[in-house]
Image (spheres, grey):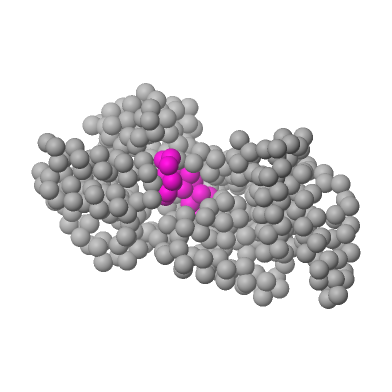
Amino acid sequence: MIERLLRELTPQVLGTVVRRFRDFAAAEDAVQEASLAAAIEWPRDGPPGNPRAWLTQVAFRRMADHIRSESARRRRESEVALEAESAAIEIAPEEDDTLVLLFMCCHPALTPSSAIALTLRAVGGLTTAEIAHAFLVPEATMAQRISRAKQSIKSSRIPFQLPTVDERAQRLRAVLHVLYLIFNEGYTSSAGLHLRRADLSHEAMRLTRIVHNLRPGDTEVAGLLALMLLTDARRLARTGAGGELIPLSQQDRSLWDRGQIAEGVALISAALPKGSVGPYQLQAAIAAVHDEAARTGDTDWPQILALYDLLGRMSDNPMVRLNHAIAAAMVHGATKGLELLDALKADARLADHHRLEAVRAHLLELLGDREGAVRHYRAAAGKTGSLPERNYLLTQAARLSCE
């Protein structure tokens, strides 16, 4: 309970502290110290009446200590810090500092990839390993990227502050990418005991809905919100009583959230005719085709394949090409899917990803090659950090071995 509360409040408090002091690195340290203090004190004494204000006050005090230690060189900041320390913290209920922080992290001094990585760390609360998994790069590479991002902001001397309306429009694409990655990590965790992290996926949906309210005419914002709604609608059917993974083809579709599906379909149906179709709209359209099929056998795979053809022309994302191979296998047969997978083997971004092995195993199984399928199911299980996914893959291998 307390851990979930801290995860929810930390980015909001960080946004408040960064806006006040305009020093991201120091503010992040201060908020981490405040969260640590809360993790120690709240279980013992109980959460305060206003947890967010408590965390903000403690973080302000930590910032005051930090600035005071440099008072010889920065007397002006020291005076501001002392004022902040004694000031009462008033949190406006309509203010959403998480969204503010999201836009602030997409800083003009950073490359898009660095801005996204930093935001996933600050807003999403993802670990460096989880962010590296999302970017398909080694963890050490991502750690260096995040460190350089913080240093670039400091060296640029461009204030780390709330962007103007025009600046927010310029940073919107990076913001949407961040929300997309946070949702994906929440919906299917890259590591851990559980298949999903509802706190991340729900927060990504909440923030995307706010962005959509701010920019109702932006078709890609609508597409991203539709994609999240249509995907999250299946959440109750994705796991069994013991938390085991249930693949899409075997899910009880009566458990799908029809309200979310209707909202998602309405959003994407309104967005697509407006032109300027982007990748989020196409992914939402694919999700809608899946969700509107009453049974697995009713899925319109030719339409999905056509949508992946379009998406592949817009994106160099290897996951798009992998999903395209699956769709091609469903339309033209498993042999065609395997041919497309062979073309992906040379892509270093997928070399150690479990999904490449898992898809190959499934297609080999469809062709009747049990030995090959078992080998690749086991290889896939060894490459995922998610316990539910690993168990599912090993179960598939064991099933084929016993048949």
Query: Which residue extends farthest front?
Result: 44
- Say left or right for 51 vs 380: right
Can residue 168 be seen here? The reply is no
Q: Quadrant of residue 116?
A: bottom right
Q: Is residue 189 magenta?
A: yes
- Residue at left offset 27%, top offset 37%: 300
- Say left or right for 85 vs 149: right
- Residue 362 or 168: which is nearer the viewer? 362
Q: Quadrant of residue 320?
A: bottom left
Tell how many labels: 0
In the rendered image, which quarter contains the N terminus? Answer: top right
**Is residue 293 positioned above or below 363 on the image?**
above
- Say left or right for 249 vs 205: left
- Residue at left offset 67%, top offset 75%: 155
Q: Position of residue 402 (x, y in %)?
A: 14, 37
- Residue 10 or 395: which is nearer the viewer? 395
In the rendered image, which quarter contains the C terminus? Answer: top left
**Is residue 220 positioned above or below 260 on the image?**
below
- Residue at left offset 77%, top offset 44%: 54
Can residue 83 be seen here? The reply is yes
Q: Position of residue 211 (x, y in %)?
A: 60, 46
Q: Position of residue 393 (x, y in %)?
A: 27, 44
The stretch of residues the image draws in magenta is 177-195
Q: Is residue 258 magenta?
A: no
Q: Position of residue 384 (x, y in %)?
A: 35, 51
- Residue 324 or 218: which is nearer the viewer? 324
**Is residue 305 positioned above or below 252 on the image?**
below
Query: Which residue extends farthest top?
Result: 254
- Residue at left offset 61%, top offset 55%: 122
